[in-house]
Image: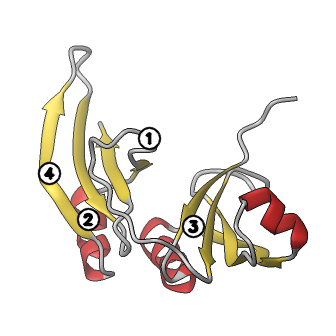
Amino acid sequence: MFRYVHTNLIAKDSQRLIEFYKEVFQCKSIGETRDLQGEWLDKLTGIPGAHIVGEHLRLPGYGEDHPTLEIFSYDTMPESYRTIHTCGLAHLAFEVDSVRETLGLLLEKGGRQIGELVETVYADGRKAVFVYATDCEGNMIELQSWS
């Protein structure tokens, strides 16, 4: 069997980021909180004395089982900075009813906008609204709506 299970975000403050995704994107707690440490985790991560805390959140639009957004914090973490065109995972995308309204809530909760909000019409006549933004910790997000 193959099944997509989760996407992991490492946060400076996992509780703050968890609340951000619950409030802005309607992610739901599924009761899977984590407080992990031990030899097995040290071996898995390659980090001596690793300690992880966080939670799995059900993504909007899906049933009770999966997929989830896994938000964790380590006791110690290096600083890093990414841009929208950095190799690797670039952004999480959420389809929303109103890009403008969701962007407003995202900004209110500590996120920031990247570039401009744009509207475009595809060759098949579908209209789309897009904007890139970040969550309250700088992770890239795309907001989109279609009509």
Q: Is residue 104 above or below residue 126?
A: below
Q: Are marks 3 and 2 in contact (CB under 8 Å)?
A: no
Residue farthest to the front?
48
Q: Secondary structure at mark 2?
A: helix
Query: Few, some or many C-alpha atoms within 10 Å of disc 4 (few <14, some 14-19, many ≥20)?
Result: some
Measured Cα–Cα span from mark 1 to mark 4: 24 Å
Label 1: which residue?
Answer: 88
- Residue at image position (25%, 75%) is 107
Q: Is residue 105 above or below residue 113?
A: below
Label 2: which residue?
Answer: 103
Q: What x and y, as percent, mark residue 63?
A: 72, 53
Viewer-proximal residue, 64 or 39? 39
Q: Are marks 2 and 4 in contact (CB under 8 Å)?
A: yes
Label 4: which residue?
Answer: 117
Q: Is residue 34 above or below residue 47?
A: below
Q: Which mark is residue 27?
A: 3
Q: What x and y, as percent, mark residue 62?
A: 66, 51
Residue farthest to the top?
123
Going from N to C along the chain, the mark reached first, 2 or 1, is 1
Between circles 1 and 4, the one closer to the viewer is 1
* Amino acid marked by disc 3: Cys
* Amino acid marked by disc 2: Leu
Viewer-proximal residue, 37 or 17? 37
Q: Secondary structure at mark 3?
A: loop
* Amino acid marked by disc 4: Leu
Going from N to C along the chain, the mark reached first, 2 or 4, is 2
Q: Quadrant of the C terminus?
A: top left
Going from N to C along the chain, the mark reached first, 3 or 2, is 3
Quick check: 14 left or right of 25? right
